[in-house]
Image: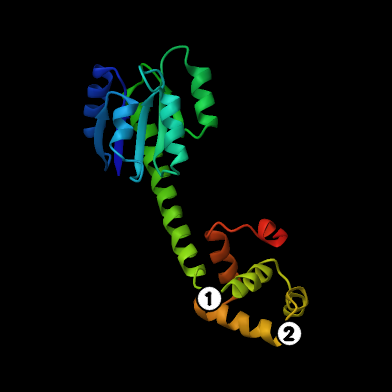
Amino acid sequence: MYIYIVDDDDAVRESTQMLLQSSGLEATTRTFPSGEEFLAEDLLATSGCVLLDIRMPGMNGVEVLKKVREANSSLSVVMISGHGDIPKAVETMKAGAFGFVEKPFSDTEIISVVSEALQDSQSHEKEASQRQNAEEILAKLTPREAEVLTKLVLGLQNKIIAYELSISTRTVEVHRARIMEKLEARSLPDLVRLYFTAGLDTETLSQG
């Protein structure tokens, strides 16, 4: 886990880094004087927290936040706002920021929000890993088996699936057995859980 401090104010970067390093948080702390330098390091695939100043020369905090979110990064972004930046900070939360703190912030406040952001990032990273694993498992299915699985998840009976796919009920039963075997599922609830962990949407697929 990492804590990235992105702020053009040298004093804020250094003091915040010293505070967080002595706080007991299990994360490596790095600092950057600009959004451009942070993004140039290609760190969006890592997990942790980004303390990101809203107002900076060049690329501002909002622009950097958008880059982080566009990359589907597991990093949780906490915006650092100065006096009068609160409306902008609220806007960034709507754009995907985890939270914001106003300068000057207290030691307790920044440690607390960073701790929560690290936990949030860890949770997102775990979900992303589970989703990738589920996608890899479902990729074992043939296109026809994937169709049958979708209809099973929708709660359709074998005979209804057979009618909709213009195949026999026996063929549906064979597909169902193969699906259970390939996905190493013991029950229909296991299939449903795997399906949604992969981020699939029955409403979208049922219309396709």
- Count of marks overlaid on the render: 2
Location of residue 153 by image quarter: bottom right
> Residue 92, relative to residue 173: is it above or below?
above
> Residue 196, relative to residue 147: is it above or below?
above
Q: Residue furthest top?
A: 84
Mark 1 vs 2: CB contact within 8 A: no
Q: Residue furthest bottom?
A: 170
Amino acid beneath label 2: Ser
In this view, the residue in front, 103 or 67, is 67
Q: Is residue 25 left or right of residue 60?
A: left
Quarter the N terminus occupies: top left
Secondary structure beneath dot 2 equals loop
Q: Name which residue lies at 33% across and 28% down.
A: 36
In this view, the residue in front, 172 or 26, is 172
Between circles 1 and 2, the one closer to the viewer is 2
- x, y percentage for residue 4? 30, 33
- x, y percentage for residue 178? 56, 82
- x, y percentage for residue 3? 30, 36
Quarter the C terminus occupies: bottom right
* Label annotation for residue 185: 1
> Residue 22, relative to residue 185: is it above or below?
above
By what rule are the colours in the image chosen? rainbow
The residue indicated by pointer 2 is: 168
Q: Name which residue lies at 21% across and 28% down.
A: 18
- x, y percentage for residue 145? 60, 75
